[in-house]
Amino acid sequence: MTTTSPSGDSVHTVVIGAGYAGLAAALSLADNGIDVLVLEASDRVGGRVHSERLDDGVVVDHGGQWVGPTQHRLLAAADRFGCATFPTYDTGDHLELWADGKCRPFRGAGPAGGPGVEQYIEATEAIDKLAITVNLDDPSATERIAEWDSETVQSYFDRTVADADARRRLALAVQGVWTVEPRDISLFHLLFYVASAGGFDQLMETAGCAQERRFVGGAQSVALAMAEHLGEKIRLNTPVTCVEHGADGVRVDTDRGPVYASHVVVAASPGAAVRIRFTPALPPSRNRWMERSPMGEVSKIHTVYDRPFWRERGLSGQATVYGDHNVGVVFDNSPEGGEAGVLVSFAYGDRQRRWAALPAAERRADILATLGAIFGDEAAHPVRYTEKSWPEDPWAHGGYAANPAPGVWVEHGATGWRTPCGRIHWAGSETSSVWNGYIDGAIASGQRAADEIIAAATP
Amino acid sequence: MTTTSPSGDSVHTVVIGAGYAGLAAALSLADNGIDVLVLEASDRVGGRVHSERLDDGVVVDHGGQWVGPTQHRLLAAADRFGCATFPTYDTGDHLELWADGKCRPFRGAGPAGGPGVEQYIEATEAIDKLAITVNLDDPSATERIAEWDSETVQSYFDRTVADADARRRLALAVQGVWTVEPRDISLFHLLFYVASAGGFDQLMETAGCAQERRFVGGAQSVALAMAEHLGEKIRLNTPVTCVEHGADGVRVDTDRGPVYASHVVVAASPGAAVRIRFTPALPPSRNRWMERSPMGEVSKIHTVYDRPFWRERGLSGQATVYGDHNVGVVFDNSPEGGEAGVLVSFAYGDRQRRWAALPAAERRADILATLGAIFGDEAAHPVRYTEKSWPEDPWAHGGYAANPAPGVWVEHGATGWRTPCGRIHWAGSETSSVWNGYIDGAIASGQRAADEIIAAATP
């Protein structure tokens, strides 16, 4: 099957990108006896999942970190490679720093009787009712797609939610899940994404939902185990510049020379994939899909303490932040045994940009001031501070995921989303019908791309 | 000023792209004694302006083609190089093929008393009233930008224009000017664009407006003359893959080796510029600006006849088309002397995609059927037929221009729009405060980028 190789390596399938999508594709192909080579631009595997063991042994997750009970593919991979998980700390009161500066305890969607909570819940229920009509296998075939993809989420909320406080809550939910502002995505993309996860609460909540468990060794541990299994089939520090493709095969150009193959799986971040030159040019619908699906904007900031002191005061460490603060959401990211206290703060969208533009010392002071306002002065004095701004990542170009702009689903969804272009196959969490944008969706997408190639290779 | 050159060429400034923006930048730099080299990916200059002389001597413009009386920079360049213009044929009745299948004559915005004309005119006047408040030098400083950039043009029309027929007319206007659907751009981008042209009518009309005159030798003739003047300072067939930049200078990598320079002007189509690898990575705001400004979608189809037979019947050859047809607008594109008859048909947005996906024979038949329905059977039998679909152009990736998606102006306009990134300067019509998206804006942008470099080079 492998094409002839004038010079350079030759394999059956090249996979571009060693994030979870690429690793899952390669693993599936290797499991089926197909010769595969993964080309990764950066110096590590995992893509938008990146765990780091700090000097004191604490593991922090700079990128994707959680796993939920319906994320079967990620759970299966963790099981295969013996990567242990543990429950996200979810005991006690969450805190809400409201726009008026008051800090209130809450459980669930917000403090009972708090500003806008009732209409917020009504709005999320209305979203769920619309979302169940989305056709997940072929979103472009959804009956009301033209209507829903023509309006921004902000216009939809402005039009349907009277209470400004409820709209504040909804905006933070959109920022937290999509890492963009409600003006940046269409109602249809929101509905599709909700549907792919199985409902709005699945995206938002901890117990029984997407944030239920964490990995003992960090969320990258499964990727590292997959990579170890693949061994020399992975080549790091090898950015792809150009893919030449034709009826006979593909030629993948890298800074270290070409690789010839029968098929290629593009599993790079959409922010990186759009920068690869395809010759001949891709069909306009695929080009447009990539061009018009910009990466979200999120920073994760970890602060480490000698102990999770908030737990002593009956607090979960979870907080939602409104008003002028740059932090949007805080979680307890301490190790399983609680031998250190770790808070992770998220900044999204407008607030991420505002925060990331500050000098380093001001960024740190800003985060610590907000944590102090929520959890008291002790939170403002961590023993360690780390931050990761995904828009500045040279290969991911952002995170968590790429979000198609208004109009993109209805205009290009039918063939631009994930239809193979000859011998070019598309993976990446953004191409998944389940848990789109999540690690689980990335694995699903890699397995689906591998299935396409296995089917083509089977006479 | 020029940096040292380990190997490869060395100049003061590299300009990427030989469209009007790049040519204007190079000309301005050369006029000021600065050593410049223009690297052009394709085998010609002109970018999204491309004139072709057919075998029978008729010149057709596959891309940008008109010049209006307030487009002073393009008129000055035409004057400098002796490129003659002539009035667009604008005599007689225009025709409107309405959604009900009826073909009605009109002058101006639509037939007096025609469906929706009154509300259409009211809506365009309302747009003009909002547009005059746009800050053209710093659009991000416009007072109501957050509100206007959060809603699609479609939502705005749905909300403010009651008459569905008026909304049909407005949709065609958006398609014709921005080559996208009203769902694809924000109200703010529409207002900015209108303001940069000097009003809605400037964009839409012929006499006294953007479509007033054409070039005897085609609109590319000025670009060809500029290129001839620059001579060996232009290198064709030289795609740029990577720009390395630092405090000391830039290194521009091409398929033919590196070029070292003190400054670089990126004047490539945004669809091409986003595919260049920058090392170190660009600031997030500039990255996002490019990623989130997709190219519009337009095809131009020329049909040539032995004479402009419609003129004999008192028709201008101009038509607007509603309903199920794929053509949106038709113009008389005959040579000045009328020695042949030429109609140019435009397809935009949804209709462009639908049409471009047809096999070649069906595309032709589809266009001729529509022209026959408007101008009679004679129009269905041209002596020659040519078409150009800009989304399939390997270097432009679309046309006329790139349109920032909803949210992009308010989120990234302040620094992402055109602020230099160190030694990297940004040109291209999309970076112009005047006639954004037009040839005139391209020239203005190139001159502005050159001014930045001239200022930096002056002690």
Image: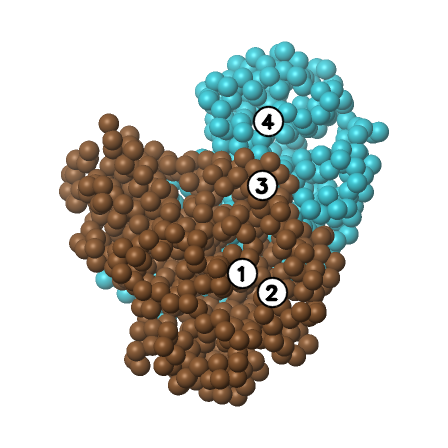
Chain colours: A cyan, B brown
- Tell me residue A124's x, y (percent): 76, 43
In the picture, the disc for residue A326 is 4
Instruction: Give the labeled residue for mark 2.
Output: B109
The span from disc 4 to disc 2 (Cα, nearest Å) is 48 Å
From the viewer's perspective, tell me whether residue A165 is left or right of residue B401: right
Quarter of the picture containing the C terminus of chain A is: bottom left
The image shows residue A200 at horizontal and vertical percentages of 71, 44
Secondary structure type for disc 3: loop
Residue A97: give x, y in percent of width and height.
Answer: 70, 23
**Which quadrant holds residue B165?**
bottom right
First-in-chain label (1 vs 2): 2
Mark 4, mark 1: which one is toward the viewer? 1
The residue under label 3 is: B133
Task: Please report, as a chain letter, where disc 2 is located.
Answer: B
Residue B219 shows which numbered tag?
none
Classify 10 Å Cα crowding around label 2: few (below 14), some (14-19), many (20 and above): some
Residue at position x 49%, y 51% from top?
A: B197
Question: Around disc 3, counting alpha carbons within 10 Å, would you say few (fewer than 14), some (14 to 19), or many (20 or more)?
Answer: some
